[in-house]
Image: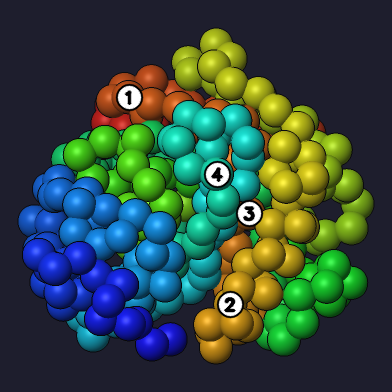
Amino acid sequence: MTISPTSLREDRSLDEVTDLLWEATLANTKTDFVHDHIDPDDIDAAYEIQRRIVARKIEQGRVRVGRKVGLTNPRVQAAVGVHEPDYGTIFADMVFESGVVLDRSRYIQPKIEAEVCIALGKELTSSDLASVEAAIEWIAPAFELVDGHMPHYRGTIVDTIADNAYCAGIIIGERQEYGAVDLAEVELSLCRDGVEITSGIGSNVMGSPLNAVSWLAQTAIEQDLPLQAGEILLPGSIGLIMDFDDGPLYTADISGLGRVEARFGGVR
């Protein structure tokens, strides 16, 4: 995708903005909002920054294993102040199993959200729902670990896109074959030390998590990066994004799918 030089503000080039975010990524620190340096509506430029950051991570030896869709739940959009979906990349070292105890020092301003993980068994060269369903290999309850390098989460769409859609990790519960559960009807209860802190239903995610995968498939095709066999996908949060505090046990029960658990520090 070609970025017009006029799409960037005069004070920063695309290279400079990419370098600012890359330096913050390496140092695990916050940096300026991307929208301070490019047009806050320039989605093409933001995805170009994301692609450059992804390429640098791959050059370091990191392995891309999937993608996530963000901002698919209207309640989450309202909380962040952005009103359209985006997507980011999942790397192998970002994938954990249910019950993991994570190191809080690896993250900046972590949050957690619960969703359905969808794995593909074949490449998606079409985005219609029939093709999406035919490509699914397995599904599972999952957490997405959210983190970002911006000053805070109330930015614009270019901030979240450039910063990998704020995706920092995925925690996956027990896998099962797709087909027995209507993903639009699944119900979520996310608890912190046994106390529910958010809930929701699958239809919160663009009417169904499958619609979010369809959106991702179409976007990926348009950007010449079609979804591949073996990729794991996160279609978006069923409930609200919640603070992920050090110590408590976080559990998410999704009806028909089961439970996923995670925590920072301590011993269970």
Which comes sooner in the sequence, label 1 or label 4? 4
Q: Residue at x 62, y 47 (%)?
A: 72
Closer to viewer: mark 2 or mark 3: 2
Observer-nearest residue: 85 or 41?
41
Kind of residue at badge 1: Asp
**4 relative to 34 in the view: left or right:** right
Disc 3 target residue: 235
Q: CA gap, disc 2 to disc 3?
A: 14 Å
Q: Residue furthest top?
A: 195
The residue under the point 82% across, 60% down is 178
**Pointer 3 or 4: first along the chain:** 4
Amino acid carrying mark 2 in the image = Ala
First-in-chain label (2 vs 1): 2
Residue at point 83% right, 73% down? 128
The CA span between labels 2 and 1 is 34 Å
For label 2, the residue is 220
Task: Compute the Cα span from label 3 to label 4.
Answer: 16 Å
- Cα gap from disc 1 to disc 3, whole angstroms: 24 Å
Q: Is residue 267 above or below residue 209?
A: above
Q: Can you tell which of label 2 and label 4 is closer to the viewer? A: 4
Few, some or many residues within 10 Å of mark 3 (<14, 14–19, 20+): many
Query: Residue under circle 1?
Result: 245
Answer with mark 2 or mark 4, whichever residue precedes in sequence: 4
